[in-house]
Image (cartoon, helix red, strand yellow):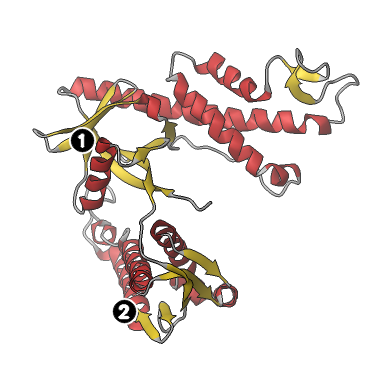
């Protein structure tokens, strides 16, 4: 049975919805404390899971050590006082209960156990090291902590409480899609899934995960669109006799190289700039290039992938085939210039997401 919904993530800036500076400062301290505890809990969880999984390989332990990860009450060979899934949560709860909402610890336990199981063989064979979580990691929360979601007409923003902490949204420019999603969440048309909070450079971001229905279009599975990625044209697609070249080399690559060249010239000229108190004034001219190239590339690839999917929908193509992808990947690996500047992998990801959202089957060859 084909899927009827997909999940998508949107980054939404939040402000603390409290009147005084002292109250907002107190909330900031609480959020940083939760972030720090989640980081410690995640590292402890991965360490405990690894020890539990590898204890049978500790050949230097004395005889009689039990190796089975099971409750000793249910299995005579079990070495745990509870079930395997509960063991980590009990450890985290004993350490951090009262300092952070226990639901955050519960979600941490669930997510990290699934992550460990997914990469288990790589850990065992020494092909992968344990994940190391840093102090700025994002922390999860479930819908049970998400309360009183509403739209406030006075401040023209959505507001809600997260574990009793009041927030309001700041959608900024280009808010149309996010506003529409939040309105649909309010009306019950879309579902909110386990999401995350990110603290970055004095700002709070809500990495909201929405479960939305797949778009319904009049598509025919037997109508096949064939697309290829090349250096001359980012995407070339055809359906029967209909053909479309999306973008061109001059538009994408030359503009990207121009940004890189401008950055290099500015960086070389920085030493002649007038300084001030510290390096901020001296690097002011360079700061405007900080995310310029990445933003340009992301914008272009979004546009190219959108035009590709629109072309498929227009001609009722229910199947999209990306041709010669292995050959293009091999060329990109061999040619450092192509690998650095053409962004094949990011473009494929955007095509995959938009095709799934539109209900189009994607095939790569």
173 shown above or below 320: above
Q: Which secondary structure lies at badge 2?
A: helix
**Mark 1 and mark 2: span between their CA atoms?**
39 Å
Asked which quadrant contains residue 95, the reply is top right
> Can you say which quadrant of the picture contains the C terminus?
bottom right
Using the rendered image of the protein, determine whether residue 338 is visible from the camera's viewpoint. Answer: yes
- Within the image, what quadrant is residue 206 found in? top left
Q: Which mark is residue 158?
A: 1
Front disc: 1 or 2 = 1
Badge 1 element: strand
Q: Residues within 10 Å of mark 1 (few under 14, many from 20)?
A: many
Question: Considering only order in the chain, which callout, 2 or 1, is on the residue closer to the N terminus?
Answer: 1
Question: Do we see residue 343 in this rendering?
Answer: no
- Image mark count: 2
Image coordinates for residue 143, horizontal then vertical, percent: 38, 29
Q: Badge 2, how many Cα within 10 Å: few under 14, some, many 20+?
A: few
Q: Nearer the viewer, residue 340 or 4?
A: 4
Q: Residue 206, relative to residue 61: is it above or below?
A: below
Do the numbered discs 1 and 2 sit on residues whose CB atoms are within 8 Å?
no
Q: Which mark is residue 118?
A: none
Above or below: residue 221 compared with residue 287: below
Numbered circle sitting on residue 251 = 2
Give the residue at x 54% y 74%: 332
């Amino acid at each position: 049975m084909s899927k009827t919904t997909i999940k998508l993530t949107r980054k939404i800036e939040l402000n603390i919805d409290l009147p005084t500076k002292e109250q907002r400062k107190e909330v900031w301290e609480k959020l940083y404390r939760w972030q720090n505890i989640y980081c410690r809990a995640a590292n402890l969880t991965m360490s405990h899971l690894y020890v539990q999984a590898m204890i049978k390989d500790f050949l230097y332990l004395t005889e009689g050590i039990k190796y089975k990860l099971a409750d000793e009450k249910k299995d005579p060979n079990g070495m745990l006082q509870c079930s395997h899934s509960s063991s980590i949560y009990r450890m985290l709860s004993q350490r951090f209960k009262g300092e952070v909402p226990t639901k955050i610890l519960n979600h941490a336990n669930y997510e990290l156990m699934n992550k460990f199981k997914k990469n288990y063989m790589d850990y065992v064979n020494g092909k992968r090291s344990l994940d190391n979580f840093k102090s700025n990691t994002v922390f999860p929360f479930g819908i049970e902590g998400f309360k009183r979601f509403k739209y406030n007409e006075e401040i023209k923003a959505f507001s809600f409480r997260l574990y009793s902490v009041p927030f309001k949204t700041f959608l900024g420019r280009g808010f149309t899609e996010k506003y529409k999603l939040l309105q649909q969440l309010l009306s019950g048309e879309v579902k909110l899934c386990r999401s995350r909070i990110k603290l970055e450079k004095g700002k709070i971001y809500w990495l909201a995960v929405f479960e939305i229905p797949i778009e319904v279009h009049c598509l025919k599975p037997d109508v096949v669109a064939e697309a290829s990625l090349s250096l001359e044209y980012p995407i070339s697609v055809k359906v029967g006799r209909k053909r479309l070249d999306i973008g061109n080399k001059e538009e994408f690559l030359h503009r990207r190289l121009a940004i890189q060249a401008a950055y290099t010239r500015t960086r070389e000229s920085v030493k002649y700039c007038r300084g001030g108190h510290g390096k901020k004034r001296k690097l002011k001219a360079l700061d405007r290039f900080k995310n310029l190239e990445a933003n340009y590339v992301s914008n272009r690839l979004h546009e190219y992938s959108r035009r590709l999917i629109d072309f498929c929908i227009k001609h009722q193509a229910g199947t999209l085939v990306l041709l010669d992808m292995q050959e293009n990947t091999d060329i990109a690996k061999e040619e450092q210039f192509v690998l650095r500047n053409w962004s094949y992998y990011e473009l494929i990801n955007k095509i995959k997401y938009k095709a799934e959202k539109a209900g189009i089957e994607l095939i790569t060859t």
